[in-house]
Amino acid sequence: MNIDMYQHILDKLPYKSSFRFVDAILSLDETGVTGEYTLRKDAFFYEDHFVGNPVTPGVIVTEIMAQIGVVALGIYYILNSPEYAEVRGGNLFPLLTSTEVSFYKMVFPGQKLTVISKQQYFRFGKLKCYIEALDEHKELVARGMFAGVIKKTDKKDN
Amino acid sequence: MDRQEILAELKKVLTPYTANKEALNSLNEQTDLIKDLKINSANLVDIFIDAESKYDIEIDMDSAEKIHDVGSCIDVILEKMKQRN
């Protein structure tokens, strides 16, 4: 595993600008992934959540954990599992199927989160992970169990 | 182990994954896991994994695709238990 592979996974993330919540992958193998994301001070949700008192919404913290912990790892599996060979070139469409998250600290604009994901299983196309998010002081911000599947999109059906 | 015994045990495996207690109480071989018990398709994976450890079997992708109701689930469990012995 090298930097090129991490970049390849980042390039495969199917998100753009305001909803892309992965800055870097620090380490990744079949047992899990560690990555980071810094909350943009001008992110679209701070103006309204809350008015005059910007705090990162829990759903966004959850999304950061999911994009790094489940989606990036899921893409790694797809790139490396023979049974997914035929979808590699197509559009990846990752879907969360369940999350159970507990929050411990608020996250403010400009803070950097480190997300550490440990794979529980990857079976029948479903990836389940235990994920923790830590702040700059390595203090726990949130943790929980996440699961997701990758849909094969076939535009002709739509 | 006969089908009736497996059905009774399967009921315990399914309990945490369904909110439809009515369908669970009247569980029978025709009960559809997704339509009747309203289990999401991703949670079926957890049910297969629970069943694997309970019966010390391994469910492969082809067998998993055959499972849609309680009866077909029992079929696969029995078939895999036979292969194990």
Image (cartoon, rainbow, N blue to C red):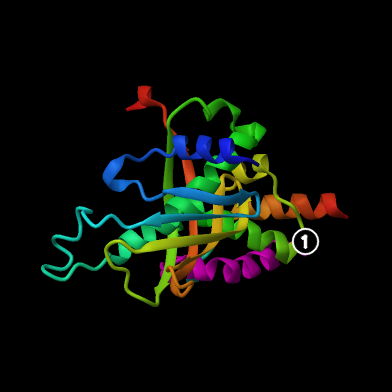
A31 and A47: which is toward the camera: A47
Residue A106 sits in quarter: bottom left
Residue A89: horizontal and vertical position, in percent? 50, 25
Residue at left offset 76%, top offset 49%: B79
Total numbered labels placed on residues in the image: 1
Going by the picture, which residue comes out furthest to the right? B85
Residue A110: horizontal and vertical position, in percent? 30, 61
- What kind of element bears circle 1? loop
Residue at left offset 47%, top offset 52%: A68
B27 and A46: which is toward the camera: A46
Q: Amino acid at mark 1?
A: Asp
Residue A114 in view in this figure:
yes
Residue B26 in view in this figure:
no
A65 and B58: which is toward the camera: A65
User: Does residue A7 lie above or below A20 as drawn?
Assistant: above
Our reading of the magenta stretch's main secondary structure is: helix
Task: Tell me which segment is drawn in magenta.
Answer: B1-24
Residue B71: horizontal and vertical position, in percent? 61, 53
Query: Mark 1 highlights which residue?
Result: B56
B6 inside magenta stretch: yes
On screen, residue B82 versus residue A134, left or right, reads right
A158 inside magenta stretch: no
On screen, residue B44 versus residue A95, left or right, reads right
User: Does residue A4 lie above or below B59 as drawn?
Assistant: above
A109 and B42: which is toward the camera: A109
Residue at left offset 62%, top offset 46%: B64
Q: Quadrant of the C terminus of chain A?
A: top left
